[in-house]
Image (tube, rainbow, N blue to C red):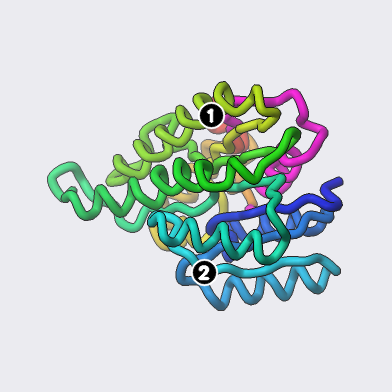
Amino acid sequence: MLAGKVAVVTGGARDIGRAISVGLAREGAKVVVNYHSSATGANETIHEIKGLGGEAVAVQADVSQSEGIQHLKAKAIEAFGEKVDILVNNAGGLFARKTLQELDESFYDLVMGVNFKATVFVIQAFEPLMRENSSIINLSSQAARDGGGGGSSLYASSKGAVTTFTRSMAKELGPKGIRVNAICPGLIATKFHDDFTNDEVRDTVAGKTPLKREGHAEEVADLVTFLASGNSSFINGVNYDINGGLAFS
C-alpha cells in the first residue's frame, strides 16, 4: 500500500511512535525514525522493521529546537533522497502534572515546545520536500477536546493548538496536494499512562468507555497508515477521535 513512499516519524522510537514506524514499514514505506533520548527503543524499532524486510534509519534530534529539525531533515535526505511522502508529528509529552499555581515559564516552554512548536516547524522544514499526494498526520489528543485530566492544562492546550493548526494547514497545503489530518487518542495502553495516570483512574476511564478497555498503540498506527495511504485521498483537515467511544458516551 505504501511501497516506494518515504516516511518521517518524530518520536518514533517507542509506544505509539514505534507502532506507527513499524506499521508504515510493514506496508512498504521507508521510515526515518526520529528519537530524542530513547536510543535503545530506536535501535529496537529499526531492528523490528528490518526483520520485516523493511528499510529504516534512526536519527537522534530534539525537534523542539530548530537545529534538531534541520539535522533530522539533512539525515532524512541523506538516507532516502529529497522526497518525503508521509510526515507524522508524534513527538510530545506531558512531563509532569502541575496545577495553575505550580506552572512556571520554563515548564510552559518545555510542554509547548515539544507538543506544538515542534509540529509547526517540522512541517515548515519538510513541506518543501513533499509532493502532490503527500500526507501529514499530527498526533493531538482527547485532552484537546475535553481539557485533559488534573494538572494537564498545558498539555491539553498544546494539543488543542495542534488540532487547530491541523485545520489551518489543511487549507494552506491542500491546494498543493498535501493532505493534513490529526489523530486524537484517548486512553491508550502506553508508558505515557504508566508514568502519569494511576491504576484507579485508568480502570475508571476504561470502565466508562463503551468498549470497556484501553486502546492499543497498534490501533492508532492502523489509523495513521490509512491516512498516509491513497485510501484516504479525499480526507483533509480532520481530527480523528480514537477512544473507544468515550467522547460520545
Three-letter residue code for mark 1? Met
Secondary element under disc 2, as helix, strand or loop, is strand
Query: Is residue 183 rendered magenta in the image?
Result: no
Q: Quadrant of residue 16?
A: bottom right
- The residue pinned by badge 2 equals 60
Stretch in magenta:
217-241
Query: Is residue 240 rendered magenta in the image?
Result: yes
In the rendered image, residue 30, in percent from the top left (x then y), is placed at 76, 59
Q: Residue at x 85, y 69 (%)?
A: 53
Q: Quadrant of the C terminus?
A: top right
- The residue pinned by badge 1 equals 169
| Circle 2 Cα neighbour tier, 10 Å, few/some/many (<14 / 14–19 / ≥20) | some
In the rendered image, residue 13, in percent from the top left (x then y), is placed at 58, 65
Image-based side of 157 in relation to 142, left or right: left
Q: Residue at x 45, y 41 (%)?
A: 120
| Vertical order, 43 against 114 (above or below) | below
Q: Farthest residue toward the left? A: 101
Answer whether labels 2 and 1 touch (C-beta < 8 Å): no
Three-letter residue code for mark 2? Gln
Magenta span: helix, strand or loop, mainly? helix
- Determine if residue 3 is in view: yes
In the rendered image, residue 128, in percent from the top left (x then y), is placed at 60, 42
